[in-house]
């Protein structure tokens, strides 16, 4: 009956609206360093089974097909794309990129994460009043494990294995003052998104495997660079147009079902 068409088309509008929200968020973060774009996944809903395939008639002949009416679509989830973003050269000594697999670890409050740790691909760092490396955002999350740069440091060098060296006045050689560690996950797509370009561990992601950059297939550190957003504007705009067209077609289906119901309602007149 047309009422099923109304419900199916309405579910399509609702799911496409979710996809539109995801695309808009991707495009809004096209300049966010370390941002990973998301893809919306869909799945069909239950079916009304009016006839089963394979049912035999009195002559032993089998019905070759069934008769099913679907009840629409729903959004099954959003999936993060962890492909590497293009490097942006800044020449700032505290701008870092992970070239390969892995996440920087930062400290967060326990009411956000019971482990007290969040993960990010954003490598824009600065120094706080204590000389500690922190994210250069509005919260200033402290890097974990903590790396402290001496107050009178004139130059900071970070090699590809994450060792941090500080040069101070009157010294001939740089002194190692810390070691960066990065975390890797079996299923990074299962991480929880909480804003600030931060991700949290979840049962789906599995526990983190932490270690030095360049070890056990973890990525290496590139100093003086930021990892750009991996949002592909061309692909997003194409998806935006497809979503608009699909929305219009579902709207047409609702109009057609509504007209059919109006016709049925007028039969008694």
Image (cartoon, rainbow, N blue to C red):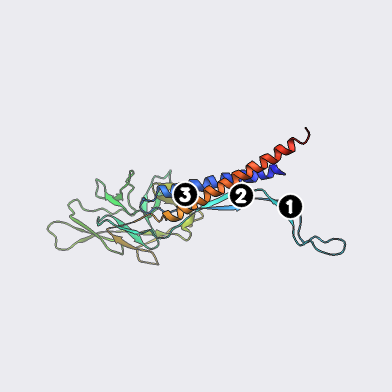
Locate residue 99, reporting x and y percent.
35, 62
Q: Which residue is mark 2?
A: 73
| Closer-to-camera residue (112/88) | 88
Disc ID at residue 23:
3
Q: What residue is rendered at 79% in x and 61% in y? A: 63
250 up-or-down from 154: above or below: above
- Secondary structure of residue under mark 1: strand
Q: Residue furthest right?
A: 58
Q: What residue is rendered at 21% in x and 61% in y? A: 175
The part of the image, by quadrant, that contains residue 184 is bottom left
The part of the image, by quadrant, that contains residue 5 is top right
Q: Cβ–Cβ below 8 Å for labels 2 and 3?
A: no
Instruction: Give the mark, 2 or 3, whose residue is nearer the N terminus.
Output: 3
Q: For this view, does 119 lie left or right of residue 162?
A: right
Q: What residue is rendered at 32% in x and 62% in y? A: 221
Disc ID at residue 49:
1
């Amino acid at each position: 009956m047309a009422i099923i068409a109304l419900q199916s088309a309405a579910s399509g509008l609702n799911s496409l609206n979710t996809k539109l929200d995801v695309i808009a968020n991707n495009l809004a973060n096209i300049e966010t360093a370390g941002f990973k774009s998301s893809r919306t996944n869909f799945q069909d809903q239950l079916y009304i089974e009016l006839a089963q395939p394979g049912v035999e008639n009195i002559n032993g002949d089998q019905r070759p097909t069934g008769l099913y009416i679907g009840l629409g679509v729903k959004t099954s989830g959003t999936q993060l794309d962890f492909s590497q973003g293009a490097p942006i050269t800044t020449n700032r000594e505290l701008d870092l990129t992970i070239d390969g697999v892995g996440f920087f670890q930062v400290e967060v409050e326990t009411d956000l994460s019971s482990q007290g740790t969040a993960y990010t691909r954003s490598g824009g760092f600065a120094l706080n009043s204590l000389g500690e490396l922190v994210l250069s955002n509005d919260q200033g999350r402290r890097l974990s494990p903590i790396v402290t740069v001496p107050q009178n440091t004139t130059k900071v060098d970070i090699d590809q294995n994450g060792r941090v060296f500080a040069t101070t006045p009157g010294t001939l050689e740089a002194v190692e003052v810390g070691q960066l560690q990065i975390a890797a996950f079996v299923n990074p797509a299962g991480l929880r998104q909480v804003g600030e370009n931060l991700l949290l561990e979840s049962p789906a992601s599995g526990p983190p495997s932490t270690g030095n950059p360049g070890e056990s297939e973890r990525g290496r550190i590139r100093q003086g660079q930021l990892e750009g957003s991996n949002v592909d504007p061309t692909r997003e705009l194409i998806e935006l147009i497809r979503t608009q067209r699909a929305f219009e077609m579902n709207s047409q289906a609702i109009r057609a079902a509504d007209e059919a119901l109006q016709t049925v309602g007028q039969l008694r007149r």
